[in-house]
Amino acid sequence: MKIFQVPILVFTLAGVFALENLADPTRIPLPSWSGCPINGPLLPRPTHLDRSQTILDAAKNLTEALDSAMQKKSKAGFDVDNTSFSIAFITPRQKNASDKSNGILWSYHHLGRKNFRGTEHLNEGSQYLIGSISKVFSDLLLLKSDIHLDDPITKYVPGLQKERSPIQWSNITLSALSNHLAGIPSNLPSSFEYYFLRSVYQQLGFPSIANESYPDCGVGGLSKACNKTQIIEMMSSALPVREPYTEPVYSSLSFELFALALSQKTGKSYIQMLNETILGPLGLKNTGASPGNDERAVIPPLDEDSLGWGSDYGYAAPGGGLYSSLGDLAILTTRILDETIFSDPQTTRKWLKPQSMTSGINGLVGRPWEIQRTKDLIPENPHTVDIYAKGGGANGYVSQMSLVDEYGVGFVVLTAGPREAATASILNEAVITSFIPAVDSETRSQALAYAGNFSVGSIQNPKKIGSKDITPVGLSLSINEGTGLKIDSLTRNGSDILAGLGKLWNSLLPMTGILNPDFRIYPTGIETPVEGEDNMVFEDWRINFDAIPADNAAMSDLPGQGKLSNVCASWQMESWIYYGGEALDRIVFKVDREAGNVIGVNIPFLRTGLLPKA
């Protein structure tokens, strides 16, 4: 196999590798290369954010800005008199792991002056329609079931597949339905049909049509909501939007269909399953299928035709018909972030992964996450931050739920007001951009516990254990303007190990690029309890072997050079080269988890044992 040919050839030609034969690479490195860190936490996630002055200052500043806007001393960007909202910053890591609070570290509520119906006092239990955030609950319900995601929908809803069905339903799996890859319509054909707007359509140039042209059910102003039989019959003749798994097509209908499959398998209604599997176990007392409790409701001052509160969504509830509260969504967010929402943490990690991509370079699609990748959040420490979000809308309501797993924090924005307002978008940007830079700053501050000098012995003052000489080893780590921990130096018995790693890499694996001399290490999330020592753990970190691409444009006159060079390949370089069975990128810290102190570090490939912190 080709992957083994280059190393074998190198050793065959070279015989024994002498240091003087480790030639430097001759390729020209790409000058614009800014480094390629790992994807994920670049430093250990911060803890005890409720004690952080940086976080408290950010909360104070945002509160003051919101107060000013609500008092009309500054521009809010929306009608504050007709708008109500509840927003929160959430972290499950502010207290000890046994804490069962909802994780809200900061919140802000505003009740519009013209809100005359519903609750008179906003709090964490106030109820809002959450629209498509309902999909998070439905996907969670699906993932918690024992149903196979690769089963075709027709296994449970066989009536969908007719002899001449345009959609080949037998090819559409529950998985495809749950992550927007089924290629089916976004809603029932009748869902956004408005009979009362027919004259408006005709004024806009549309032809006049007879009532018989409309679907038999679910048409606003003409017919009743569709029942289960009508839904299945309507979809058996519906046209596909795409072939399955070609590209994401947003679909609320998909959630209605896999909810029918779950009901068919369990013999229970969607509401029964939701209560038994999620709402009850998590203690979510202000979440359910619309209609909710009017006395706890946040009801915007809109006319009845424009207001969603009080609606019975029926079979459409799984895709967008739930109500919830700030407190309940905070509990859900907390349980996802601390990886206890499922019986094992691996399922949560799998859930927080992309399933497909959009045409935008910064947009990915999950199950059902709307994933935004941005480098604009932290100017002082620019790097890619992934936001796993889900937005939702219902008549008079827009909401947003966001998770930033890199830092272990989340955000919830619930709004009620004029449909055309950008309230949720404005508030979402305000709360995320206020707290994420502060959280990053606190993360780096807490990570200073890992920085410093770790050593044993020295060239000038050699040490012994009994009659055995101790080879001097030194590791110096720091936090600067870059990502992760920077290795300033790594020496053994006077030898520069970093320089040696560079020579080894550039000689053994020159085809991968030029090794970046800026060595940095990142946590892997792998921890092992220290036997016999309470609260002590060994943390695995890895040196990031960052391969700088060659500057093809500087080396070749052939056309098109440099257009495809900016490729991040460091994820392919982990755990490649070994010395005596130990990977050349593995570093292990011994940490007192309770006190947050770093006791020492072990560099297995150098056989150092534990190097104490100076």
Image (tube, rainbow, N blue to C red):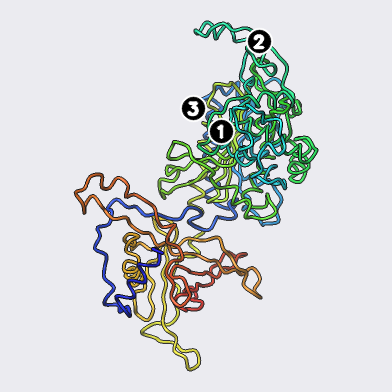
Q: Please name whichever residue, 614 or 601, is drawn nearer the observer in this view of the structure.
A: 601
Q: What residue type is disc 1 on?
A: Gly
Q: Secondary structure at mark 2?
A: helix
Mark 1–mark 3 distance (CA, rounded to whole Å)? 45 Å
Which residue is at 25% across, 60% downward?
A: 27
What's the distance in space between the residues labelled 1 and 2, CA to CA?
A: 27 Å
**Residue position for label 3:** 74
Q: Residues within 10 Å of mark 2 (few under 14, many from 20)?
A: few
| In this rendering, the label closer to the viewer, 2 or 3 | 2
Give the residue at x 62% y 32%.
132
State whether residue 109 appears in this view: no
Q: Quadrant of the N terminus?
A: bottom left
Residue 222 on image: x %, y %: 69, 12
Camera-side mark, 1 or 3: 1
Q: Which mark is residue 183?
A: 1
Query: In this view of the protein, which residue sits in the foreground, 145 or 596?
Result: 145
Name the one closer to the observer, 211 or 358: 211
Residue occupying image coordinates x 42% and y 61% = 573
Residue 61's spot in the image, x, y percent? 52, 40
Q: Which mark is residue 274?
A: none
- Quick one: 374 or 204, which is closer to the camera? 204
User: SS for tag 1?
Assistant: loop
Task: Give the total of numbered labels.
Answer: 3
Q: Check the image and report above or below for 36 versus 105.
A: below
* Sequence-earlier tag: 1 or 2: 1
Q: Residues within 10 Å of mark 1 (few under 14, many from 20)?
A: many
Question: Please, what is the three-letter code of the amino acid marked with disc 2?
Answer: Glu
